[in-house]
Image (cartoon, grey):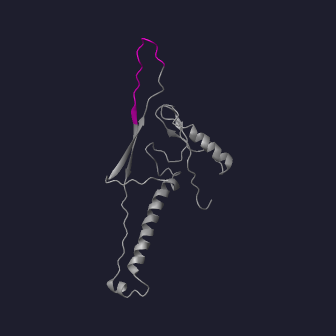
Amino acid sequence: IFEFNSSIKAFEEDVLMEGFAAAAVKGEGTAVGYDTASEQYTSRYDHDTVALAFAITEEAEEDGLYGSLAKKYVKALARSMQHTKEITAANILNNGFSSSFTGGDGKELFATNHPTGGDGDQSNELATSADFSETSLEQLLINVSKVSDDRGIPIAAQGVCLIVPTDL
């Protein structure tokens, strides 16, 4: 669900830009209207460095009755690193309902009151909690299609991926 981008920066920052309101019809010979775009908040993402190593004695490698231990350990280490990446990424969703993990707007990922610059609060949850069903999925897709920017202009969002835990 996430894109991979390599970066040599210590951190990344995203600035939420509030765009413009809908343009007004201008009469002939009248002045054009002006609007002001603005920055709402900045989100900063610090990169984590993960590391794990193993040591093996020369004797253990030489005495390996079942092939090279180092090769087996390298494969196990690769699995460990991949697992760490997946858990770290999944924690964005796993912690999405916790107020201890907030975004730039000060709200958890799954909140009913994400503030906007001028279009009131927006929600990315159902108005009434519901078990997963065809009806609740349809309502979620309708809600996604109605998302607008900070000035109330629809952004034409579409649901493209459904993420369901293995246990469900």
Residue at position x 48%, y 34% in the image = 150
Residue 161 visible from this viewpoint: yes
Q: Is residue 23 above or below residue 84?
A: above
Prevailing secondary structure class for the magenta stretch in the rendered image: loop
x then y, percent, for residue 122: 53, 38
Name which residue lies at 44% across and 85% down. Answer: 66
Along the viewing direction, whichever of 101 and 1 lies nearer the viewer: 1
Residue 128 appears in the picture as rendered: no
Vertical placement of 71 versus 100: above or below? below
Give the image location of residue 159, x and y in percent.
Answer: 56, 45
Judged left or right of residue 38, residue 98 is right
Q: On the image, which quarter does residue 158 sit in? A: top right
Question: Which of the image's four quarters has the C terminus?
Answer: bottom right
Point out the stretch of residues depicted in magenta: 25-39
**Vertical order, 154 against 164 (above or below):** above
Furthest residue to the top? 29
Q: In the shown orientation, is residue 93 left or right of residue 53?
A: right
In the image, 150 versus 115, the foreground residue is 150
Based on the picture, tell me whether residue 84 belongs to the magenta stretch.
Answer: no
Report whether 82 appears left or right of 56: right
